[in-house]
Image (tube, grey):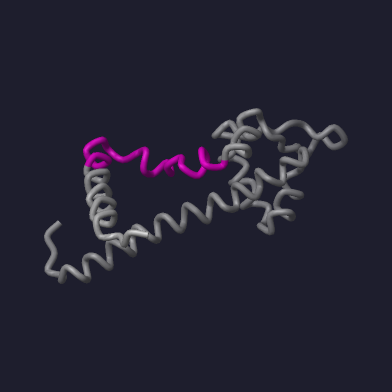
Amino acid sequence: MNSSLPQGDLAQHAWSLMYGFMETHLRRRGVRDKLLCHLRGGPATLVQLAQMSDIDAPHATRIVDKLESDGLVERRPHPDDKRRKLVTLTPAGTNALTTPDAVLLRPPAEIGRLPVDALEQLIRLLTLLVDKDAATAPIR
C-alpha cells in the first residue's frame, strides 16, 4: 500500500481500524456471553432470552444460531407448545461458562479466514508492537 499520507495519519488510521474491529467483536461476545449466562439457570425460549438480554427477538435468534453452530447450545421442542423451542446449554456451553478465558481468547472467524501469509504478516506486525511496547514500558 503506497500512501501519500503522513506517518502519523497512517498510524491513526491503523489504530482506528484495529480498535473498531476489537470493539465490535468484544461487544458481540458480551451479548453472547450474557445470553449463555442466562441459560445457566435452565432452558429458555428465544423470547425469554431476548427479554433477559435486553435485545430484540431477531437479534436473539441470530446469536442462538451462532451459539448452536459453535456447539454451545441446542434447541429442543417445548414440552407444552410444539410451535416453540427451548434453548439449552450443551456440555460444551457449560464448559465455556466455567472457562471464560477460553471463549474470550478464541479469535473471531474473520481472523481465521485470513490467508496464511496475511496471518504471518499480522503476527510479525503485532509482535513488533508488543516488543516495542515492552521495551518502553516503565518498570513498576
Q: Position of residue 128 (x, y in %)?
A: 22, 50
The answer to which of 42 and 101 lies nearer the viewer is 101
Vertical placement of 21 versus 16: above or below?
A: above
Residue shown at 56% from the left, 42% from the top: 100
Q: Position of residue 98 (x, y in %)?
A: 62, 37
Q: Is residue 116 magenta?
A: yes
Q: Position of residue 134 (x, y in %)?
A: 28, 54
Magenta residues, start to end = 100-120
Residue shown at 76% from the left, 43% from the top: 45
Q: Residue furthest right?
A: 80
Kindly indicate the quadrant of the structure image that contains residue 1.
bottom left
Q: Is residue 117 magenta?
A: yes
Q: Is residue 64 left or right of residue 49?
A: left
Vertical placement of 26 versus 120: above or below?
A: below
The answer to which of 11 and 111 lies nearer the viewer is 11
Residue shown at 27% from the left, 65% from the top: 13
Residue shown at 24% from the left, 42% from the top: 118
> What secondary structure is the magenta-colored segment mainly?
helix
Q: Position of residue 111 (x, y in %)?
A: 36, 43
